[in-house]
Image (cartoon, coloured by chain):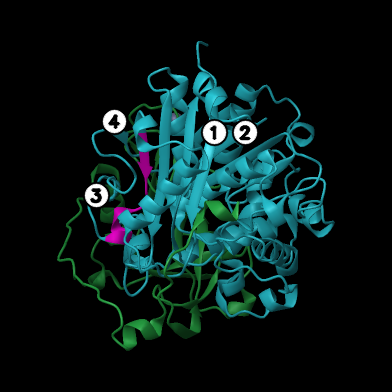
């Protein structure tokens, strides 16, 4: 197909916090400078920059990515912003990939930043505008409704209990205890702790939800000839995929993320993966809610429909299980600064495949991993497969 | 990878209360008036008359609600509006105990996706359930629209107050 091979050679991030004193630009700079430093490059080595951030309305700044681009190293360079809601973080890496795969650029800096804390009294005020202005907003919806309705559809389709799903929150918050950038890591949290949190919109309880956060993450992506010069441990982008379902969300089957399956099939085909359950060793599916990790694992074809909860209960998705899932601690544990959280997942696969994940390192020297995010009007799947 | 993480300054609520940080605030003054459009315009007009309508694609035959003037699958125009029942089935629901800004409410709101009778399978709309014990709500429950009195209707989704068990 005439595509150039693309590697990730560096990654960096800020600590995720509930509310950072740093501005969006400052957070972007911190992550970008860490990513460059990690592969001993400088901004002079960068040909183009991808700067992604999720809704402008969170920050109250129109063209927010352009506003913070100075912090992301965008000055005087070809800069692009992508925005697919919660799917943005993984999509940013896909954009970095096609900048290089196309042959247009050799070395690209990919920066994702999110500051959710600026929006008062609650970022839901901005989020609410995803509902249709004429047929839905007059009902005065709450953003949690859409997730609660989906979670209930999923639970009811497969006869799942709240406990089946809370196990995901427990696993991820425990994993996050070993992540130096995590906001909500807790090595001692139990299923009872999650089940005892307040009910927000049944079946969604406080413990099922990832926290509002501020933070930034950056990657350096480059062509093979640059990668060979920069590092002896390049991590290759083997496949990318993304797909969008209808915006008429009340017409969709809410118990299954078809958009993730379509994105995964596209990425697996590119990566030459025919048996994902054997060929993928580690997964970072998007987990803003605990049920979403299960939903997405099924969409990624890593478990049969309705079977991801059972696999979780059996410990298969633990860091030392057969298929470690969200060894980073995910959004539930590390935090959920939207665009940055998605790119954090790509960075985690990068660190894991290089054997650099420290206390979070999964055993068995994984060779291939998948990261996935979900967003837009709850309708997009974005998938990237990395390998060594 | 600890060396690849840049520390950030974590602001706590008391930092603001005690005036230890500087910040700026702004209240946006942005108001919008959205046109209902062709398909939803008709949908609202019919709601005012106490009826639900969908559209049928001549190509794939799907009867869709909310109605649209084109089929997103076949990508052809649609000009056939079809009357639907004002009854349906609960596809999924939630019991919501918080407002959008996380203030607790005692009696839960019960949002639901309701598959409308007369539309193709799985074609639902979002609305609320009422006149029902929250504990008794089930997926698969049959429900019917409770309309505002005709003189109070204004051509809005809220012309249906809620759906109640049949
Ligand atoms: Zn059609």
Q: Which type of secondary structure does the marked residue at label 1 adopt?
A: strand
Q: Which mark is residue A67?
A: 3
Residue B156 in the figure: left or right of residue A362: left
Same chain assignment for discs 3 and 2: yes
* Residue at point 67%, 74% (across, down): A194
Q: Mark 1 and mark 3: span between their CA atoms?
A: 26 Å
Q: Which residue is mark 1?
A: A8
Query: Comparing marks 1 and 3, which lies closer to the viewer?
Result: 1
Read off the chain for label 3.
Answer: A
Q: Is mark 3 within 8 Å of ligand 1?
A: no
Is residue A55 located in the magenta-colored stretch of the structure? Answer: yes
Q: Is mark 1 within 8 Å of ligand 1?
A: no
Q: Which type of secondary structure does the marked residue at label 3 adopt?
A: helix
Residue A99 lies, with reference to residue B157, above or below; the image says: above
**Marks 2,4: beta carbons within 8 A:** no
Residue A312 lies, with reference to residue A301, above or below; the image says: below
Q: Mark 3 and mark 2: span between their CA atoms?
A: 31 Å
Q: Residues within 10 Å of mark 3 (few under 14, many from 20)?
A: few
Residue A5 in the figure: left or right of residue A361: left
Quadrant of image for the C terminus of chain B: bottom right
Q: Which residue is mark 2?
A: A386
Q: Which mark is residue A84?
A: none
Q: In this structure image, what is the colour of chain A? A: cyan
Please provide the residue range marked out in magenta. Answer: A49-59
The quarter of the picture showing ligand 1: top left
Of mark 2 and mark 1, the one earlier in the sequence is 1
């Amino acid at each position: 197909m005439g595509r150039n091979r693309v590697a990730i050679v560096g990654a960096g991030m800020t600590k995720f916090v509930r509310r950072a004193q740093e501005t969006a630009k400052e957070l972007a700079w911190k992550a970008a400078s860490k990513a460059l430093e990690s592969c001993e490059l400088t901004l002079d080595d960068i040909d183009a920059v991808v700067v992604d951030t999720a809704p402008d309305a969170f920050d109250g700044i129109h063209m927010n990515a352009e506003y913070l681009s100075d912090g992301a190293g965008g000055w005087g360079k070809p800069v692009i912003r992508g925005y697919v809601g919660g799917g943005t973080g993984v999509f940013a890496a896909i954009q970095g990939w096609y900048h290089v795969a196309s042959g247009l650029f050799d070395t690209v800096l990919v920066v994702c930043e999110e500051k959710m804390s600026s929006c008062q009294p609650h970022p839901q005020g901005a989020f609410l505008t995803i509902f249709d202005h004429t047929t839905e907003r007059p009902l005065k919806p709450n953003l949690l409704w859409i997730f609660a309705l989906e979670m209930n559809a999923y639970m009811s389709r497969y006869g799942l209990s709240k406990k089946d799903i809370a196990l995901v929150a427990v696993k991820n918050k425990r994993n996050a205890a070993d992540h130096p950038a995590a906001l909500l890591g807790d090595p001692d949290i139990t299923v009872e702790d999650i089940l005892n949190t307040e009910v927000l919109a049944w079946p969604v309880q406080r413990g099922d939800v990832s926290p509002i956060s501020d933070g930034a993450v950056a990657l350096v992506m480059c062509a093979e000839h640059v990668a060979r010069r920069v590092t002896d441990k390049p991590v290759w982008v083997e496949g990318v995929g993304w797909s969008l379902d209808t915006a008429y969300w009340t017409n969709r089957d809410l118990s299954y993320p078809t958009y993730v399956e379509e994105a995964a099939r596209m990425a697996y085909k590119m990566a030459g993966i025919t048996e994902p359950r054997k060929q993928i060793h580690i997964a970072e599916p998007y987990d803003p809610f605990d049920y979403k990790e299960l939903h997405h694992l099924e969409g990624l074809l890593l478990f049969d429909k309705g079977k991801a909860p059972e696999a979780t209960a059996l410990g298969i998705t633990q860091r030392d299980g057969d298929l470690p899932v969200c060894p980073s601690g995910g959004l539930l544990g590390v935090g959920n600064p939207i665009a940055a959280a998605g790119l954090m997942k790509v960075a985690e696969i990068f660190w894991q495949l290089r054997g650099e994940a420290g206390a979070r390192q999964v055993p068995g020297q994984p060779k291939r991993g998948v990261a996935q995010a979900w967003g837009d009007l709850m309708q997009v799947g974005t998938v990237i497969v990395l390998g060594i | 990878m600890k060396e690849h993480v840049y520390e950030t300054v974590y602001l706590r609520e008391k930092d603001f209360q005690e005036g230890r940080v500087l910040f700026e605030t702004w209240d946006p003054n942005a108001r919008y008036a959205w046109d209902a459009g062709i398909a939803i315009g008709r949908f609202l007009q019919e709601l005012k008359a106490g009826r639900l309508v969908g559209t049928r694609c001549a190509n794939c035959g799907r009867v869709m609600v909310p109605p649209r003037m084109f089929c997103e699958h076949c990508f052809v125009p649609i000009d056939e509006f079809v009357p639907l029942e004002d009854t349906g089935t609960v596809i999924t629901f939630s019991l919501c105990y918080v407002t959008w800004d996380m203030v607790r409410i005692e009696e839960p709101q019960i949002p639901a996706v309701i598959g409308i009778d007369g539309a193709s399978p799985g074609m639902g709309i979002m609305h609320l359930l009422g006149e029902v014990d929250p504990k008794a709500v089930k997926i698969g429950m049959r429900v019917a629209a409770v309309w505002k009195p005709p003189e109070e209707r204004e051509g809005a989704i809220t012309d249906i107050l809620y759906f109640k068990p049949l």
